[in-house]
Amino acid sequence: MAGERAHGDGPVLVTGGTGMLGQAVVAGLVRRGRAVRVLSRRPGESPVGVERVVGDLTTGAGVDEALAGVSAVVHCASEPRRPQHDVDAAAHLLLAARRAGTPHLVFVSIVGVDAIPYSYYRAKLEVEHLVEVGGVPWSILRATQFHQFVPRLLDRFTVAGVTVLPAGTSLQPVDVDEVAMRLVELVEVGPSGRVADLGGPGVVDARTAYRLVAQARGRRPRSVSVRLPGRSFAAFRAGAQLAPEHGTGRRTFEEALADLR
């Protein structure tokens, strides 16, 4: 499977192509001169060279039409608040891909999904398993958290202006454009199986990440560190979400935060 090249002149289908990562993948494919098709639940305008098809992966509606004639699929669609939808979506996508004879499915996952018993991560791991046995040639890339995700995560842990920091935890933020570039490369290379993880260039502890975000936003830091209970947070404290041996990303967290200023 590894080393086979993608074939056909059909467009590359990007699921979740209107999301943050999906848009970056679409832009990268267009720069490579590839025809691109985006699957979206709603009609709308698309960039030049990008076809938009309306469909719903969670129900299967429109998915066969979206896959007609494509040469590869980059599966970026995800619903963190409804993890089971990710599993349903993958099942519908794989069945439709088999019917269409799609030669290559590229799936983006998350570092630590096999070690952190968080419901969304469990769903991602289940999708990985479906992809591996789904009868479609595949590539799977696990990435660490995006730079842009960190401020949003900290906001979720903020109550009455005070941010609760999970004590003993760290992150390894990576640039979304760099992840997108790797996914585009995998489309070009062809089915490669599970490839090396992609992590950001440095590990940053939760307190430092919060201080840098507050500074970028021009706010005075107000936080408290708490050892949060549960197996998921225990796994985070153990570093299951990190990939220091694969810290090949180049853009640093501090550089990304400059966009907040």
Image (spheres, rainbow, N blue to C red):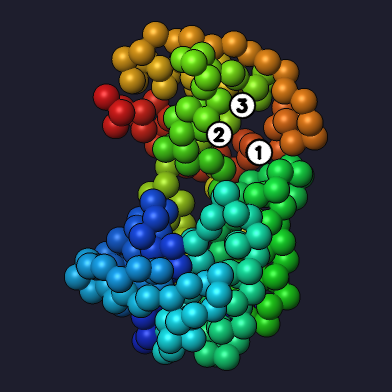
Residue located beneath label 3 in the image: 170
Which residue is located at x 59 percent, y 77 percent?
92
CB atoms of marks 3 and 2 within 8 Å: yes
- Drawn side of residue 81 relative to residue 37, left or right: right
Q: Do the residues labelled 1 and 2 touch (CB within 8 Å)?
A: yes
* Disc 2: CA contacts within 10 A as few (<14), some (14-19) or many (>=20): many
Label 1 close to label 3 by CB (< 8 Å): no
The image shows residue 156 at horizontal and vertical percentages of: 52, 30
Residue position marked by numbered label 2 in the rendering = 172
Earlier sequence position, callout 1 versus callout 3? 3
x%, y% of residue 142? 60, 52
For the point 39% across and 63% down, which residue is it? 17
Mark yes or no: residue 113 visible.
no
Q: Residue furthest left?
A: 48
Q: Where is residue 123 in the image (x, y as percent from the top left)?
A: 68, 56
Q: Would you say 229 lies left or right of 46 here?
A: right
Q: Which residue lies furthest to the front in this view?
A: 160
Q: What residue did someone put label 1 on?
A: 241
Amino acid on which the number 3 mark rests in the picture: Ser
Query: Badge 1: how crowded within 10 Å, few (<14), some, or many (20+)?
Result: many
Q: Where is residue 167 in the image (x, y as percent from the top left)?
A: 67, 18
73, 62: nearer the viewer: 62
Cα distance between the residues tagged 1 and 3: 8 Å
The kind of secondary structure element at disc 3 is strand
Q: In which quarter of the image is the N terminus?
A: bottom right
Q: Residues within 10 Å of mark 3 (few under 14, many from 20)?
A: many
- Residue type highlighted by circle 1: Gln
